[in-house]
Image: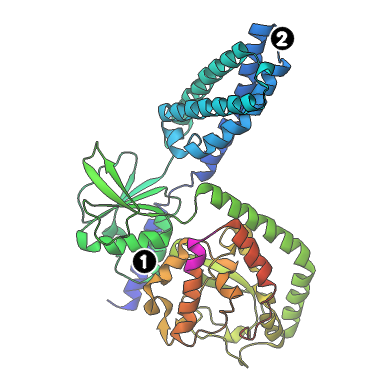
Amino acid sequence: MNRATLDRLDAVRRESVEGRLAPSLERRRLRAYIVTMLTDGALFVLCFALAGLLWEGRWGGTRALFAAQAMLPIYFTIALYNGTYGVTALADWLFASRKTLVALLISAGLFNFVAFYAKSNEDFSRVVMTLGLLFTAIALVAMRRIMAMVIAHRWGGRVANRLVIDDGGTAFPFAQADRIAAADFGLDPTSHDPFMLDRLGKLLRNQDQVVISCRPERRADWAFLLKAAGVYGEIVSETAHDLGVVGVHHYADLDRTTLVVSTGPLALRARILKRLFDLFVAGAALAALSPVLIVVAVLIKLEDGGPVLFVQRRLGRGNQFFDMFKFRSMREEKLDPDGNRSAARDDDRITRIGAFIRRTSIDELPQLINVIKGDMSIVGPRPHALGSRANNKFFWEVDRQYWQRHCLKPGLTGLAQVRGHRGATEVEKDLTDRLQSDLEYIDGWSLRRDIGIVLRTARVLVHENAF
């Protein structure tokens, strides 16, 4: 099959993929969590105020309101950790009610425990406390039932995106799940084709749960791809084998068992923290560095009249392609969109202003726009061009784990960069050193570590390998 035919097939597959993209439900769920928490807080206070009115004859008595306000932080802390505000709670109001009541009872017990040792029990009316807790329990359960009715009416009862990929395995009739056949989209887990991985990444985008039904000999390959995509993934199987299983899920109604092989590197709270950190740092940096950005843009334009920005396709989260922005540092007629040739010392393609901005890493600053857009993060594995090589091998040919570094958004800086792993990848070790740092960063992510990497980046902005 010639190249033109392959290109046409790839274009058809891209069009079919675009028609199967799942909408993001994360923001919708987040709004539901916030509304539920605010309503819970209001109901808490109102119910205790009502208890004070009924027993003491005063609406909003000081003792009743103080008890509610003292218990609320304890209740929210427990509720946030026991699943009261989670996807399952949105989908199943009975589950949500049980978790809510457990959080309420524990918070009441802890409150009374602290009050006992503080010798302040006598400051609270036992009747008001009992009535307040009873009214609150009824109100919170009623709120869960109402929320379920609203979700059924407004969202059609769908709170999560689920996808089943059939690759020749046993049937998996998963309710409320989309289904696709791997063959229809040219999905082959044994392939290293970046275009196939891009299609798969787009199909898995916004999916909360992915189930693969495949032949036994392909399970290890699918497990690897799910981990590299950074999604919650399961593989239909009765045996674990060598898949690196992190859990087993049994579907009693389907008489099927799946192996949980990937969960994604970051939970919801961690993703929110990382995104807020990205927006804060990128927004502040763009505002503070705007004079520098303007001056550099003018100098680039004045030197040869070419475009200010160089836009290059890079590999991003889930092995999907995205357009990365840089200040143009090479002559317009010698640009290398695919990154087939690494920049070298005394490179004849680099302009005079380009040499300076590359040496000082100023050429990377437009990627702050990528961070604002959500294509990149402030800290993460650096994105590579599609044609990048080490020892004349594509990066994924050097080490298959290369694909797993893309389970997080790529970063403006990263652990590899602050360790000095920069510049051209002339030998395989140049890549494996970076890859090891990237995988270490993914396994041990924390907001504190991101802050530390940002601070350490200032020391390596000017580097001997930056040319």
| Quadrant housing residue 253 | top left
Looking at marks 1 and 2 on the same chain, the residue that comes earlier in the sequence is marked by: 2
Secondary structure at numbered mark 1? helix
Q: Amino acid at mark 2?
A: Arg
Report the magenta residues as a range. Answer: 439-445
Which residue is tagged 2?
Answer: 58
| Quadrant housing residue 77 | top right
Dominant secondary structure of the magenta stretch? Answer: helix
Which residue is tagged 1?
Answer: 196
Q: Residues within 10 Å of mark 1 (few under 14, many from 20)?
A: many
- Circle number at residue 355: none
Residue found at x 66% / y 70%: 456
Which of labels 1 and 2 is toward the front?
2
In the rendered view, does 254 fall on the left or right side of 407? left
Residue found at x 56% / y 79%: 421
Residue sitting nearer the eye, 51 or 207:
51
Determine whether 243 is above or below 415 in the image.
above
Q: Is residue 257 magenta?
A: no
- Is residue 295 at least partly visible in the picture? yes
Considering the image in quadrants, where does the C terminus appear?
bottom right
Secondary structure at numbered mark 2? loop
Give percent across and percent down for residue 178. Answer: 34, 46
Determine whether 331 is above or below 247 in the image.
below
Q: Residues within 10 Å of mark 2 (few under 14, many from 20)?
A: some
- Is residue 385 at least partly visible in the picture? no
Q: Amino acid at mark 1?
A: Met
